[in-house]
Image: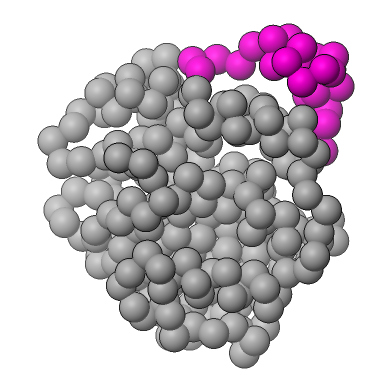
Amino acid sequence: MQQFSNGTLFLWSDHWQVVGHLIPNRPHRHTSASWLVGLDGPFRLQVEGAWRETRAALVAPDVEQALDPGQTRMWCAQLDPDSAYWRSLQPRLNGADSLDIDVDCLELAGCDEAGCESIEAALAAAVTQVGVVSNPIDPRVARVCDWLRRELPERIEVAELAEAVGLSSSRLSHLFRQQTGVTLRRFLLHLKMNQVLAQWEPGKSLSQLALEAGFYDQPHFVRTARGMFDALPSEYASGGRFRICRCGLSS
């Protein structure tokens, strides 16, 4: 997770966005797809060990990346592997780990406004401009994703999930990875980390956050946060450096 000197984190059930000045981070692997735009100029992006300078980029789920934003404000979105946004953008990669985007085709004005509606409209417009019409996710995989997002079980019971959607365990595991680009276990861990963001508030301990999100224990939560975001919530949310807008989440 990127850290802020100032900015806003916007949360929805299937993606989140941030706008603001970020600090550099070390290599990590988001389970979600990364949409990265430098609002004031180019930034440096590392993908699978190789650095490059770009103004806007798309990175596939579960691909190692690191960010050096320099002085530019960033507009970043993390798109769940089953989200309609990612489904529209995925074909543009054509199997590659990442792709630079022509920033001239993007409408960036909405990113400077503070509300959920304006930043969501900006992302929707960008995906319409850059993405393509794609096939919907397999309905059996969609049912599994919806159930995991709703229930947040402590662990994956593949046999039970497979039986519920009329597949064998091996077929479900293969189809899920094929459709989303990540494993069932990685997807569940991603959803739990999103739950941490949704439930975070000043004064909550790491152990309390981990328990509420369904992690085994605090060390498991810490390892997951470091691997996926290169930070803990207390490191980027403390000190009032940015505000959280729970845009599409039920209270």
Whether 161 is among the magenta residues is: yes
Image position of 26 with respect to 110: above or below: above
Q: Residue at x 69, y 10 (%)?
A: 160
Q: Position of residue 226 (x, y in %)?
A: 44, 38
Quarter of the image for the C terminus: give it. top left
Image position of 166 with respect to 112: above or below: above
Q: Position of residue 57 (x, y in %)?
A: 63, 70
- Asked if residue 52 shows in the view, the reply is no
Image position of 204 with respect to 90: above or below: above
Q: Nearer the viewer, residue 53 or 8?
A: 8
Which stretch did the figure color magenta?
153-178
Whether 14 is among the magenta residues is: no
Image position of 196 with respect to 7: above or below: above
Q: Nearer the viewer, residue 49 or 134?
A: 134
Q: Residue at x 73, y 69 (%)?
A: 131
Q: To which quarter of the image does residue 159 belong?
A: top right
Q: To which quarter of the image does residue 250 belong?
A: top left
Q: Residue at x 77, y 36 (%)?
A: 139
- Asked if residue 174 shows in the view, the reply is yes
Which residue sits furthest bottom? Answer: 104
